[in-house]
Amino acid sequence: MTERRLDVLCIGNAIVDVISDTTDAFLEKEGLTKGSMRLIDAEEAERLYSHMGRAREISGGSAANTAAGIAAFGARAGFIGQVAPDQLGQFYRHDLTAAGVEFTTPEANFGVPTARSMVLVTPDGHRTMNTFLGAAQHLPPTALDEQQIASAAILYLEGYLWDPEVPRNAMVRAIEVAHAAGRKVAFTLSDTFCVDRHRDGFTQLIDGGHIDILFANEAEILAMGGVPHLDTAIGAIKDKVETLVVTRSEHGAVATQRGDRAHVPAQPIDKLVDTTGAGDLFAAGFLTGQAKGLSLEQSLTLGAIAAAEVIQHYGARPEADLKALAGAVLA
């Protein structure tokens, strides 16, 4: 077996997040549904950006947020994603690397710029995402570093990247390489719209035994299970994967693993500011725990700690010391 060098290697959309405060009135004026995520083209990206208020930029994308969270816990994280040879691409690489994440995927010129997502945050903490995928959706199998994949204890994939055919092929190849090396494969359903669009593909992955650890929030697992009750949805899927993790916002999270079941409550917070990245950081905590051999409940607790930290400020990067917050759980 290839020597283990990384704890978790994440594959996903390399997207620069452009985060701005907004109001419900602005969303209504723009015809946007609060809390939704939509894909837009380059023209709409420029138009919306010109209408937004002051914003700040950060290297983002679901899997990259998870990788940054894993690094913040002190674990060894890597990321595979596609950026263009432009200013945002250079910013993205520098910002993610500065967060402690190994990011060595070469930039590539596909005639489109680096992806960006305009994240509009309302006073109640909910975010509305408007995403131009740009170069991110062109990640080819040839961009994969198969030695890097084989060296990671866990390969983590985001459902958002399943949409375009080219990166889907890259993800399938990455799964093959990881399993051939005896590694675990984790997958997040990402969003109910991903489930609605790709239920057949996701079902094939799950039923085919290609996924070891499956992440979903409550709405996603209900959509995937095709049933209206949480326990029924969990029951329909839990025996098809080694580990199933379902996050439930303020109600905490539940997980099953080889017949065991664990639940943890949400961690207390002072104030909800921005839910951006809550699921991504929960995955970071859980995967860190699993990579370090912690129990199901301990891994869930790390996830809850990371999610609680990130929703108390803007953006999907932890600002407090996650290792300190984890305390004895990581000791």
Image: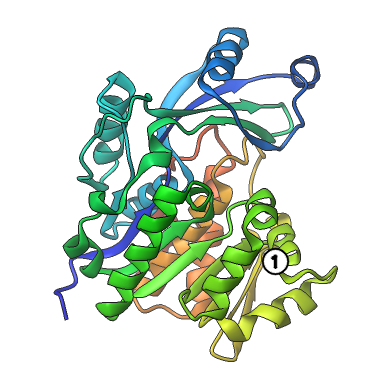
Circle 1 Cα neighbour tier, 10 Å, few/some/many (<14 / 14–19 / ≥20): many
Q: Extreme top residue here?
A: 50
Q: Is residue 271 visible?
A: yes
Residue 83 at what x, y percent from top left? 32, 34
Task: Residue 82: name its quadrant.
Answer: top left
Residue 48 to residue 63: above or below: above
Residue 132 at what x, y percent from top left? 51, 29
Residue 322 to residue 203: above or below: above
Side (left or right) of 115 relative to 154: right
Identify the residue at image location x=77%, y=77%.
231
Q: Extreme left residue here?
A: 3
Amino acid found under the numbered disc labelled 1? Met
Question: Who is closer to the viewer here, 175 or 1?
Answer: 175
Side (left or right) of 235 relative to 159: right
Residue identified by numbered label 1: 224
Question: Who is closer to the viewer here, 310 or 77?
Answer: 77
Identify the residue at image location x=35%, y=56%.
170
Residue 166 at what x, y percent from top left? 40, 49
What is the tally of numbered marks visible in this picture?
1
Quadrant position of the N terminus in the picture = bottom left
Q: Which secondary structure lies at badge 1? A: helix
Identify the residue at image location x=30%, y=54%.
141
Residue 246 at what x, y percent from top left? 64, 67
Q: Extreme right residue here?
A: 228
Side (left or right) of 305 relative to 100: right
